[in-house]
Structure formats: C-alpha cells, structure tokens
C-alpha cells in the first residue's frame, strides 16, 4: 500500500503541545495503518491509498480538531512529491544556508491564484523572498531566526488559505527516509 505524509500545522508551536505517541494513536483511531511520526513538528507518515486526498485531509482535520480542541490544517503529500519539493532549486539555486539564511517550503492545499501570488510577492523585502512552484511556496529568509520583520498574520492574509511550512532540509530528510529521496 502506498505511503502518505501528513504535514500538520499547529503541532508543538504556539502552546499546542502534542506528544508524538498521542498523535500516532489519533491516526490509528481513524483506522490508518503503519503510522509513524518524524520529528516532533507534525509530520505523520501512514499507509493510505486515498483516491481523493482532499477528502482524507478533511477527515484528519475533523478528527484532530475534535481530539485536540483546535483546528489542525493538514496537507497530504506522497514521499515522491516531497522528494520533488526537496530537489527543487528556487531562487536560481541559491544556497540559503550560506550567509546564515534559511529556506522553507510552505505547503498549500492548492496552487495559489494570481491575486494571492501578487499579495505574497508584495511582502518581499531585503529579508524575505518568495517563489511559487505549484502547491508550494518557497520562502527564503536571508537570516535565521524568528526575529523576522514579516509577521505570520500578514503572511496568512497574503496567502489567503491554510499553509504549513517545513525547512527544506527537513523535507529532504523526510523524503529520503520514506523511500523517495533525491538521488
């Protein structure tokens, strides 16, 4: 059976602490098999052959909101899709870590529309750069740390829909561990 990766928003950030063994049990309670977690930031891997991943995302979101008491946006990808994200070289292939920067892949439900792209691009600065590729929005912060000038609320409004972000290094390790890493 194919594997799926659930990238969850609001797990172990902002006071929403969830132990990984409890998160695995929540997925198992939904009848999902082969459940594993990868680092404590809301990455859940499980066996699943969903014809409609959007329906499975909504099912997981409903279950987790009921169990945890707050909304948990869920983004499903296959290990191969994560490997493709990890292999991308946005911003002309810049090494984000050189010079102390950091690059994240923001996972979206659907590709952003033209208006959302324009709103996000309006947030570019000397500190932050963005590039859209399909259902992912790459965010290059030229310096590390959360002491950034761009607020998450502003980014939420610009994107106009749910998203979650992972460091591209984490995306690569996740894809490699679950059988579809870049060669």
Image (cartoon, rainbow, N blue to C red):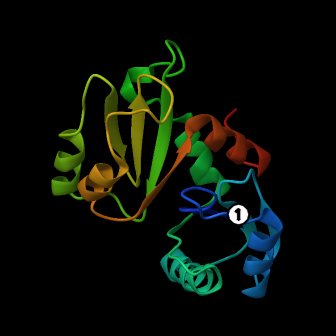
Is the residue 62 above or below the residue 168 in the image? below
Give the residue at x 32% y 54%.
153
Left/right placement of residue 14 relative to residue 132 reads right
- Asked which quadrant contains residue 7, the reply is bottom right
The residue labelled by disc 1 is 44
Query: Is 79 left, or right, of 94 in this rendering?
Result: right
Which sits in the foreground, 148 or 141? 148
The single residue placed furthest to the top in the displayed view is 99
User: Who's the residue at 51% across and 81% down the image?
Assistant: 58
Relative height, residue 60 to residue 168 (above, below): below
The reply to whether residue 10 is visible in this rendering is yes
Q: In the depicted view, which residue is nearer to us: 72 or 60?
A: 72
Q: Position of residue 38 (x, y in %)?
A: 75, 53
Counting from the top left corner in percent of width and height, residue 128 is at: 33, 31
Residue 162 position (above or below residue 25)? above
User: Considering the image in quadrants, where does the N terminus appear?
Assistant: bottom right
**Secondary structure at numbered mark 1:** strand
Q: Residue at x 53, y 71 (%)?
A: 72
Give x and y (percent) for residue 41: 66, 54
Q: Viewed as shown, does residue 67 lie left or right of 159?
A: right
Residue 1 visible in the picture = no
Label 1, residues with CA under 10 Å away: few <14, some 14-19, many ≥20: many
| Relative to 92, residue 4 above or below | below
Q: Quadrant of the C terminus?
A: top right
* Residue at horizontal 48 percent and vertical 77 percent from the top: 54
């Amino acid at each position: 059976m194919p594997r799926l990766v659930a990238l969850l928003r609001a797990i172990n950030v902002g006071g929403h602490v969830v132990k990984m063994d409890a998160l695995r049990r929540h997925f198992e309670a939904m009848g999902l098999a082969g459940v594993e977690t990868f680092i404590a930031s809301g990455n859940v891997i499980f066996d699943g052959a969903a014809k409609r991943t959007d329906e499975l995302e909504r099912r997981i979101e409903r279950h987790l909101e009921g169990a945890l008491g707050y909304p948990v946006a869920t983004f499903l990808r296959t290990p191969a899709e994560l490997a493709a994200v990890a292999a991308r070289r946005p911003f002309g292939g810049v090494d984000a870590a050189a010079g102390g920067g950091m690059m994240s892949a923001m996972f979206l439900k659907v590709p952003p529309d033209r208006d959302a792209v324009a709103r996000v691009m309006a947030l570019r600065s000397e500190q932050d750069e963005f590039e859209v590729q399909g259902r992912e929005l790459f965010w290059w912060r030229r310096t590390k740390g959360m002491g950034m000038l761009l607020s998450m609320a502003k980014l939420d409004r610009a994107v106009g829909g749910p998203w979650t972000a992972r460091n591209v290094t984490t995306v690569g390790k996740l894809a490699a561990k679950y059988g579809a890493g870049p060669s």
